[in-house]
Image (spheres, helix red, strand yellow):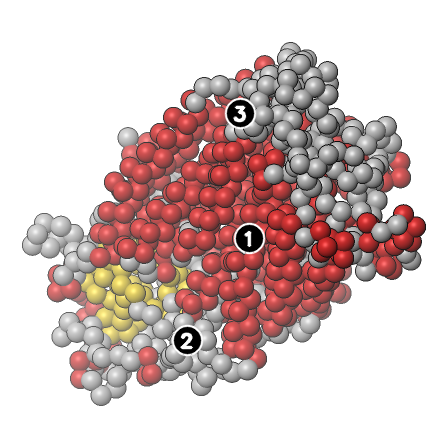
């Protein structure tokens, strides 16, 4: 292990060599960097751009839903200029709406949230939190970002090709994905292969890093919960993505090479009657959801990790039930591989198979409830500081709670008969990802910003950003529960107008005016949510050069190792190779002079401190003497 | 009580025998969800107030010592287990494995296409003609074997699905069995008031059944993205009517079919 580290990291060479490496030219330092922190920042900036882009697609879709067929105001002509005939006169016809829908999902999941929560935060923080000088494979890490970047470019380019981007949903179910007359689907598949490759390279790197590069004394049960969450996430990516990569290649062959993996015999669809035969559309659905359900946990586990760090820091006390959290997250990781077909209850599933997936789905709700419960209970007895990161985290808990609870009816096939593919589903998973994961990401950005830049973000504008985002998020997604309960279906280019009571006379099942009318309020709330991000964007860039300078390397008085580095951490991270003496959340230790005890602080008087039940006797010294 | 909660949750009207069972499960789950959420929020609000730094400047290293949370988690698991094994799984067994006898049911084949619904009735002999996927073409939506005499009197229609509301000798409403398929892409056959959804998947023919309980004209929804006409695939209707009206309607279509002019 040691030789591998030395080989990969010139930091252990002489000081002169170290400095020369760190101060390479602009290109090698910022673009083709192998430093995990620079790569983390690259991921972060790129993914934040895609987050905004995906959000803009959503605003355009909400316009079309609320005002079907009418040209988009203000930017309609721009839309026409960029997209050409796919957006005639600045309107959004069904083809374009379906493109936006497919790409909103694809971009948000694969190009924004996962790269932010896993790649950006994970790259920057995991090596720092375990006391490592870098990732185990820095060049693989660089390649991971480059594949991600190329995949993103391919997805973006697909918007401006003739007939536009993929239109078959982020799920890309064949035969629809194959029969739509656009090369956008080919771009989507090639882009996905790049993105999956990127994730796989990242995943092996995280796993190797956490297993091999932990600092002396950093035992498994002393890892910050964030590292545990990232570690499990890496396994999910490693094991769940290869089936989709294979499936993506198979669908690509169906699309361009005349094979018939997903096309059944007797398909009467334009251009495919001659070639189709023997394939199975359901096979794709199984392969897709075998990835995409673990992917849901890829979206949420890193967020839980961020939340745990910030709660411990701002309650000034250890996380309650650290071991329960670790076991819960391991259970979630395992179980997430055997729940996928609960997305497919209505494909004609018999009793045995549907019972299996209903049982596993109910079982996986238990560790999820344990995680949330531990985080809630951690607040009891704290001395809670309400800074911006903590506010976002405090909102995460109930918002994630709503998202998790509303998953229960969707997890039972019987209730799914009514709720499947309605707006109830949209509201459910957006509560998990938007005011859930994205709030955790915001919290993490505000929290670690001073370590990355050496300056604080503005606290007042941070709070403005928080309160407005919280209100408008709920005004957007809460009405969707009511819409879904009334039977409004998702993926309708006209927002369900053709199925509304106003349009369908003399029939039972039309959507009431009250339910249809909610679209307009949701559009307004979405626009306001967009405006609410302006303070954040300005704050984010302005604070790089104008924010309040931090006066210490550890401005939040935190215990974990990333705060025990110079600010910002140099190439190679630690001025002195850290040794770890205790668990990650030793806040307010009785008898200690300060209310935080960093993991690498040697004991003044060993063995006098009481043992925390979760971390064994405090101050059990590692074999290596501290320097 | 059911009706009250249906209204509170905004669940639409029901028109099949099993629909209220589906709604009941949704109602029970929402009661569980609301109780848990309100409990969490009450605790949460108290904690945020009580342990604000200004009121509790010194944090407690150990925190909560009791195991109340474990009991609550256990209770949640038990309730989930009861709903799963007591309601959801038996329901699914009834819905997917306990089909009513074919000769006492109204049987209709359903083939979805971009962007319409095709229906096929067995005709006077009560039997569908043989089918094979290899016969499917743009003019032979159902893949009917042209050499099978049983298929000669079959009736094919687009977008109108009529079924009779009549009691069988056993005193229950006559059930309807639908065989759902698609000729091009994946669609999903959904009628809100029946609380019924079934994906229509090319290459598969999946049976579903229900007992209608109310006369009426019901919107058929396509619940799976099926292309640029997905949102306007709203021409299909289910008409639940008296036996006399149904017979009259079927006879008119049968004579039209025998003259070779399909609707």
- Does residue A36 appear to the left or right of A27 in the view shown? left
Q: Are marks 3 and 2 on the same chain?
A: yes
Give the Cα separation between the discs numbered 3 and 2.
56 Å
Q: Is residue A17 left or right of residue A117?
A: right
Residue underneath mark 1: A235
Does A277 appear above or below B19?
below
Do the residues bearing badges 3 and 2 touch, measured as CB atoms within 8 Å?
A: no
Is residue B41 visible to the viewer in this orientation of the structure? yes
Element under disc 1: helix
Q: Earlier in the sequence, mark 3 or mark 2?
A: 2
Instruction: From the image, state whether disc 3 or disc 2 is nearer to you.
Output: 3
Q: Position of residue A377 (x, y in %)?
A: 52, 25
Q: Which mark is residue A279?
A: 2
Question: SS for tag 3?
Answer: loop
Label 1: chain letter: A
On screen, A566 above or below B94?
A: above
**Residue A480 vs residue A279, the one in the foreground:** A279
Query: Secondary structure under badge 2?
Result: loop
User: Where in the figure is residue A69, as x and y percent of width and height?
Assistant: 60, 58
Mark-to-mark CA distance, 2 and 1: 31 Å
Q: Judge by depth and name the residue closer to the eye, A12 or B162.
A: A12
Q: Which quarter of the rendering shows the C terminus of chain A?
A: top right
Q: CA distance from mark 1 to mark 3?
A: 28 Å
Please give the label number shown on residue A613: 3
Mark 2 vs mark 1, foreground winner is: 1
Residue at 29 percent of width and 80 percent of height: B132
In this rendering, do the residues under marks 1 and 3 share a single chain? yes
Few, some or many residues within 10 Å of mark 3 (<14, 14–19, 20+): few
Please determine if labels 2 and 1 lie on a single subunit.
Answer: yes
Q: Position of residue A150 (x, y in %)?
A: 71, 65
């Amino acid at each position: 292990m040691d030789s591998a580290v030395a080989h990969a990291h010139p930091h252990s060479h002489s000081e002169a060599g170290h400095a020369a490496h760190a101060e390479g030219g602009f290109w090698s330092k910022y673009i083709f960097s192998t430093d995990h922190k620079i790569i983390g920042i690259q991921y972060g900036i790129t993914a934040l751009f895609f987050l905004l882009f995906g959000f803009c697609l959503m605003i355009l879709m909400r316009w079309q839903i609320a005002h079907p067929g009418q040209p988009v105001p203000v930017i309609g002509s721009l839309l026409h200029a960029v997209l050409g005939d796919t957006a005639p006169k600045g309107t959004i016809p069904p083809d374009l709406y379906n493109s936006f829908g497919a790409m909103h999902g694809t971009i948000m999941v694969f190009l924004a949230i996962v790269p932010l929560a896993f790649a950006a935060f994970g790259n920057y923080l995991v090596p720092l939190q375990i006391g490592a000088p870098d990732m185990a494979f820095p060049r693989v890490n660089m390649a991971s970002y480059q594949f991600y970047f190329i995949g993103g470019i391919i997805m973006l380019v697909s918007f401006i090709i003739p007939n536009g981007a993929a239109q078959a949903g982020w799920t890309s179910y064949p035969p629809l994905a194959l029969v739509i007359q656009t090369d956008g689907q080919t771009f989507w598949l090639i882009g996905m292969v790049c993105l999956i490759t990127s994730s796989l390279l990242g995943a092996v790197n995280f796993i190797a890093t956490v297993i091999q590069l932990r600092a002396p004394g950093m035992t498994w049960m002393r890892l910050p919960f964030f590292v545990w969450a990232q570690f499990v996430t890496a396994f999910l990516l490693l094991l769940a993505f290869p089936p989709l990569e294979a499936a993506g290649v198979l669908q690509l062959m169906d699309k361009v090479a005349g094979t018939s993996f997903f096309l059944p015999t007797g398909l009467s669809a334009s251009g495919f009657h001659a070639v189709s035969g023997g394939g199975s559309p359901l096979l794709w659905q199984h392969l897709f959801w075998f990835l995409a359900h673990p992917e849901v946990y890829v979206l949420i586990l890193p967020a839980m990790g961020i939340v745990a760090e910030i709660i411990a820091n701002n309650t000034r006390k250890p996380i309650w039930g650290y071991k329960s959290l670790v076991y819960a997250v391991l259970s979630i990781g395992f179980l997430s591989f055997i729940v996928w077909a609960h997305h497919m209850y209505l494909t004609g599933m018999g009793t045995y198979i549907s019972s299996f997936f209903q049982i596993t789905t109910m079982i996986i709700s238990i560790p999820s409830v344990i995680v949330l419960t531990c985080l809630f209970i951690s607040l009891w007895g704290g001395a809670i500081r309400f800074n911006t990161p903590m506010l976002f985290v405090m909102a995460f808990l109930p918002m994630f709670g709503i998202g998790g609870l509303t998953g229960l009816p969707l997890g039972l096939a019987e209730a799914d008969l009514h709720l499947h593919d309605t707006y109830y589903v949209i509201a459910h998973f957006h509560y998990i990802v938007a005011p859930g994961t994205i709030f955790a990401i915001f919290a993490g950005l505000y929290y670690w910003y001073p370590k990355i830049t050496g300056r604080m973000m503005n606290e007042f504008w941070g709070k403005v950003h928080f309160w407005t985002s919280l209100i408008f998020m709920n005004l957007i997604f809460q009405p969707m529960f009511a819409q879904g309960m009334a039977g409004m279906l998702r993926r309708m280019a006209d927002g369900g107008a053709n199925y509304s009571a106003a349009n369908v006379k003399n029939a039972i099942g039309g959507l009431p005016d009250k339910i249809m009318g909610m679209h307009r309020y949701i559009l307004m709330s979405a626009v306001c949510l967009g405006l609410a991000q302006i303070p954040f964007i300005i704050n984010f860039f302005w604070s790089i050069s104008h924010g309040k300078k931090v006066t210490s390397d550890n401005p939040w008085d935190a215990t974990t190792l990333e705060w025990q580095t110079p600010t910002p951490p140099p190439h190679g991270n630690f001025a002195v190779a850290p040794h770890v003496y205790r668990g990650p959340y030793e806040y307010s230790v009785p008898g200690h002079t300060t209310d935080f005890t960093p993991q690498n602080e040697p004991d003044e008087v060993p063995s006098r401190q009481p043992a925390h039940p979760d971390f064994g006797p405090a101050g059990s010294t590692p074999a290596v003497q501290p320097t | 009580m059911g009706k009250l909660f249906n209204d509170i949750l905004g669940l639409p009207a029901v028109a099949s025998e099993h629909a209220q069972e589906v709604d009941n499960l949704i109602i029970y789950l929402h009661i569980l969800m609301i109780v848990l959420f309100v409990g969490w929020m009450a605790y949460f609000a108290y904690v945020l107030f009580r342990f604000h730094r200004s009121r509790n400047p010194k944090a407690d290293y150990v925190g909560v010592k009791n195991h109340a949370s474990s009991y609550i988690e256990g209770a949640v698991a038990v309730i989930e287990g009861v709903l799963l094994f007591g309601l959801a799984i038996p329901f699914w067994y009834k819905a997917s494995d306990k089909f009513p006898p074919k000769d006492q049911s109204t049987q209709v084949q359903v083939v979805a296409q971009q962007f319409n619904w095709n229906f096929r009735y067995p005709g006077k002999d009560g039997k569908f003609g043989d089918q094979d996927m290899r016969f499917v073409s743009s003019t032979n939506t159902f893949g009917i074997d042209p050499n099978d005499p049983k298929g000669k009197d079959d009736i094919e229609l687009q977008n109108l699905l009529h079924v009779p509301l009549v009691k069988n000798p056993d005193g229950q409403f006559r059930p309807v069995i639908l065989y759902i398929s698609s000729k091009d892409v994946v669609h999903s056959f959904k009628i809100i008031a029946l609380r019924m959804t079934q994906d229509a998947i090319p290459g598969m023919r999946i049976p579903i059944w229900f007992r209608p309980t109310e006369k009426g004209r019901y919107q058929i929804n396509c619940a799976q993205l099926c292309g640029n006409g997905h949102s306007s695939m709203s021409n299909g209707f289910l008409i639940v009517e008296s036996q006399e009206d149904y017979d009259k309607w079927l006879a008119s279509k049968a004579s039209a079919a025998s003259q070779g002019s399909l609707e």
